[in-house]
Amino acid sequence: MDPQALLAPDAGPPLGASRARVLGLLHAAEGPLSVQQIAGQAGLHPNTARFHLDALVDAGLARREPQPRATPGRPSVAYQATDGHGPAGPRRYRLLAEMLTSMIAGTMPQPGAAAVEAGREWGRYLTGQLPPYERRDAAQAIDRLRASLEEIGFAPDLVAAGRGHRLLLRQCPFREVAERHPDVVCALHLGLMQGVLAQMRAPVTADRLDPFAEPGGCVAELTTEPAAEPGEPAHRPGGPRPAAPPAGISPEA
């Protein structure tokens, strides 16, 4: 581990394809752009465009610019790219991630198990709550999982495999830390996928994650369960069934 690499400012947060496209439009523009302009140029719904723009503002990559109005009322808001460092200067999140991950790996009795459970909690939170008694089918759930991983920055590709699917994660947004602490970071990613699927009450489980199983990427194994009979719950209460940890990583370690 190179201390100088840890102390270097972060290049910026990893962006999904849609958010990167929105940021590119802001950089290419000669002046501030409205939500409607971004939505039209990026091919997004205005609410989705606003979501990405607000996230870029929170990350310090864009700023809001009040626009004058010809009629009385609250000024409209447009968005413009910043220099990428935000109002408080450059960030060093990799150093923070290394400090916290090494503490978990070195001091907790079962770091892998704790990371899986933390990932499940965050997966459920990021997915949101479905209405009572509503559930997603396997195809809908897998598509939502793929979209969530894309947004985080994993660049996933979906491949059918027997009773289930394989997700090829072509990029790891936390690669440097994951290579040093796969028992924590990769277990966290497995739990994240399990939490997303469980929140949708879908007949799909994320059973395994093989870190760096292919050149440049990891492989997640998804299993589709048989369709439930009428009146029978489509998913075991309380979330995903017990799943195998990532290859070479034991949650009990």
Image (cartoon, grey):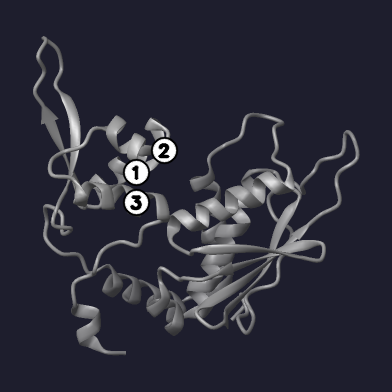
For discs 3 and 1, the disc positioned in front in the rendered view: 3
- Kindly state the secondary structure of the residue where label 3 is placed: helix
Mark sitting earlier along the chain (2/1) = 2
- x and y, in percent, of residue 76 in the image: 18, 24
Helix, strand or loop at label 1? It is helix
Q: Which tag, 3 or 1, sits closer to the chain's start?
A: 3
Residue in the image at 11% along x and 56% along y:
88
Badge 2 crowding class, 10 Å Cα cut-off, few under 14, some 14 to 19, many 20 or more, is: some
- In the picture, measured across the screen, residue 32 lies left or right of residue 11, that is left
Q: Earlier in the sequence, mark 2 or mark 3?
A: 3
Give the residue displayed 59% in from the left and 48% down from the top.
144
176 shown above or below 222: below
Residue type (three-letter) at the residue carrying disc 3: Arg
* Residue identified by numbered label 3: 21
Amino acid type at image mark 1: His
Q: Camera-side residue: 65 or 190?
A: 65
As measured in the structure, the alpha-carbon distance from the residue carrying label 3 to the one carrying label 1 is 10 Å
- Select label 2 or label 1 by which is in front: 2
Residue farthest along the right direction in this orientation:
229
For the residues bearing labels 2 and 1, Cβ distance under 8 angstroms: yes
Reading the image, the residue beneath label 1 is: 52
Badge 2 element:
loop
Residue topped by disc 2 = 44
